[in-house]
């Protein structure tokens, strides 16, 4: 296999893993948490200076939009990050998860189409971070994973239930 073919194959693996992790693993688990918490529980904050699951869902959507959709030119960056954390209701739980799912689907479609050159090319994110395309993709994965873990933990604490992720 030539170096170019190997690089193209690696880009396809990155895209497949991005899709699998977001849509195949995190999204069904977040949906399970959403179902268990319901509309009121999704906006409950564990403590006064903590974020609700609703805040985290808005935040994940904003972050993915900024780091994937805006970085790779499929949308403008109009993110209002403080509003993601200031929100304290007004959106039903399922609407929040459906909006995140739609954003993640769009992001996966973008990453599916990235060439090796796009993954290697540097760009500026949030007007201050210089990242390669691959760096932006990896950032979204690790960022979403961290906050998904918070959602899972809070759901377990709030409901006292086994989330049964491996039974899904």
Image (cartoon, helix red, strand yellow):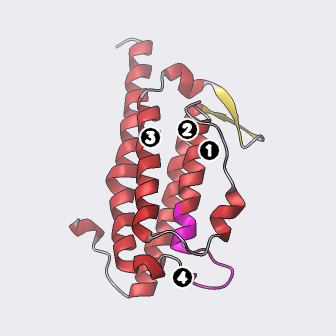
Confirm or deny contact between disc 1 and disc 4 (CB under 8 A): no
Task: Provide the residue designation for mark 2.
Answer: 69
Confirm or deny contact between disc 2 and disc 3 (CB under 8 A): yes
Q: Tag 4 or tag 1, which sits nearer the N-term?
A: 4
Q: Say left or right for 61 vs 29.
A: right
The N terminus sits in image quarter: top left
Note whether 54 is above or below 79 in the view shown.
Answer: below
Q: CA distance from mark 1 to mark 2?
A: 6 Å
Q: CA distance from mark 2 to mark 3?
A: 8 Å
Q: CA distance from mark 3 to mark 1?
A: 12 Å
Task: Provide the residue designation for mark 4.
Answer: 44
Task: Provide the residue designation for mark 3.
Answer: 106
SS of the residue under disc 3: helix
SS of the residue under disc 2: helix
SS of the residue under disc 1: helix
Q: CA distance from mark 1 to mark 4?
A: 26 Å
Per the picture, the main secondary structure of the magenta-coloured stretch is: loop
How packed mark 4 is, by other alpha carbons closer than 10 Å (few <14, some 14-19, many 20 or more), is many
Residue 101 at x, y percent in the picture: 41, 53
Confirm or deny contact between disc 1 and disc 2 (CB under 8 A): yes
Residue 87 at x, y percent in the picture: 63, 70
Mark sitting on residue 7: none
Identity of the residue drawn at 49% across and 58% down = 145
Q: Tag 1 or tag 3, which sits nearer the N-term?
A: 1
């Amino acid at each position: 296999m030539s170096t170019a073919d190997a690089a193209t194959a690696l880009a396809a693996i990155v895209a497949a893993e991005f899709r699998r992790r977001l849509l195949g693993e995190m999204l069904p688990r977040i949906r399970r948490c959403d179902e268990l918490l319901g509309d009121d529980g999704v906006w409950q904050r564990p403590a006064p200076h903590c974020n609700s699951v609703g805040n985290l869902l808005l935040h994940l959507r904003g972050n993915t939009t900024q780091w994937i959709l805006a970085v790779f030119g499929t949308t403008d960056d109009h993110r209002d990050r403080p509003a993601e954390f200031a929100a304290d209701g007004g959106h039903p739980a399922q609407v929040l998860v459906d909006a995140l799912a739609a954003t993640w689907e769009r992001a996966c479609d973008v990453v599916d189409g990235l060439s090796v050159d796009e993954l290697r090319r540097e760009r500026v994110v949030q007007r201050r971070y210089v990242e390669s395309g691959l760096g932006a993709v990896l950032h979204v994965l690790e960022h979403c994973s961290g906050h998904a873990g918070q959602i899972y933990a809070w759901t377990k604490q709030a409901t006292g239930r086994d989330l049964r992720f491996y039974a899904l």
